[in-house]
Amino acid sequence: MLSSFICSLFFLTQFRLPFSLSQYCLTKFLCCGSSRNSNHIIKMAMWVFGYGSLIWKAGFNYDDRLVGFIKDYRRVFYQGSTDHRGTPEYPGRTVTLEPAPGEVCWGAAYKISKEEDKEAAITYLEVREKQYDKKAYVDLFTDPLATTPAISGVMVYIASPDKKLNPNYLGPASIEDIANSAPPSKPVLAQKPHNA
């Protein structure tokens, strides 16, 4: 059994199968071995990468949090938000990712293991990230010198530049324009000092 397991690991790593296929094959082997009993299935954890406000405010239950980075992407303030950062008339800017060969984007990845927590997290994220039209599955690195990822298959929400799929995409702008893209605010009334 152990030699079969080692051969399976060698096969999976040498032929660089897609993560989902490797994960499936390894899970089936570990759970079922050479027996035909498939009632013992290991549930795989889900990982979500945050590169904006998810870094400090997850909003869902998770088992572990890793600070790390993904390769060949950069964080940009190119996405418009018409719900929590702005209005339809004055969309506020939020971050998204764009492909950038050779660059890295730091953030935090969250491990979610329990099925009920996975379902709750997806439901929450689909509302929170509703203006992001794309999900990608990326490799997460925690060590800048590492050549292999700490975790593969980490889900990340991305807003694409395709205006047909993503009508809230704002695109590049000067730093001044990005800083001034917040919707007009209501005037703040002066408050009296407490000792007056």
Image (cartoon, rainbow, N blue to C red):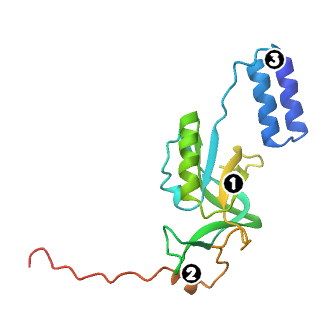
Residue positioned 40% across, 81% down in the render: 185
**Element at label 3:** helix
Q: Distance between the residues labelled 2 and 3?
A: 57 Å
Label 2 amino acid?
A: Ile
Residue 144: mark in rendering: 1
Position of residue 133 relative to residue 177, above or below, is above
Q: Which residue corresponds to mark 3?
A: 2
- Vertical comparison of 61 with 193: above or below: above
Residue 189 placement: quadrant: bottom left
Mark 3 and mark 1 in contact (Cβ < 8 Å)?
A: no
Q: How far apart are marks 1 and 3 (CA)?
A: 33 Å
Residue under numbered circle 2: 178
Q: Quadrant of the C terminus?
A: bottom left
Q: Is residue 127 left or right of residue 6?
A: left
Circle nearer the viewer, 2 or 1: 2
Where is residue 83? Give x, y as percent. Answer: 50, 68
Label 2 SS: helix
Q: In this view, does 28 lie above or below 157?
A: above
* Image coordinates for residue 15, horizontal then vertical, percent: 91, 39
Tag 1: Cα neighbours inside 10 Å, few (<14), some, or many (≥20)? Answer: few
Name the element at disc 1: loop
Q: Residue at x 75, y 28 (%)?
A: 27
Mark 3 crowd level (few <14, some 14–19, many ≥20, 10 Å Cα): few
Quarter-of-image position of residue 166: bottom right
Tag 1: residue type? Pro
Gap in Å between the C-alphas at discs 2 and 1?
A: 30 Å
- Please identify, in this view, whether the residue under mark 1 or under mark 3 is nearer the observer: 3
Q: Amino acid under label 3?
A: Leu
- 10 lies left or right of 148: right
Q: Considering depth in this image, is 129 or 190 the residue closer to the camera?
A: 129
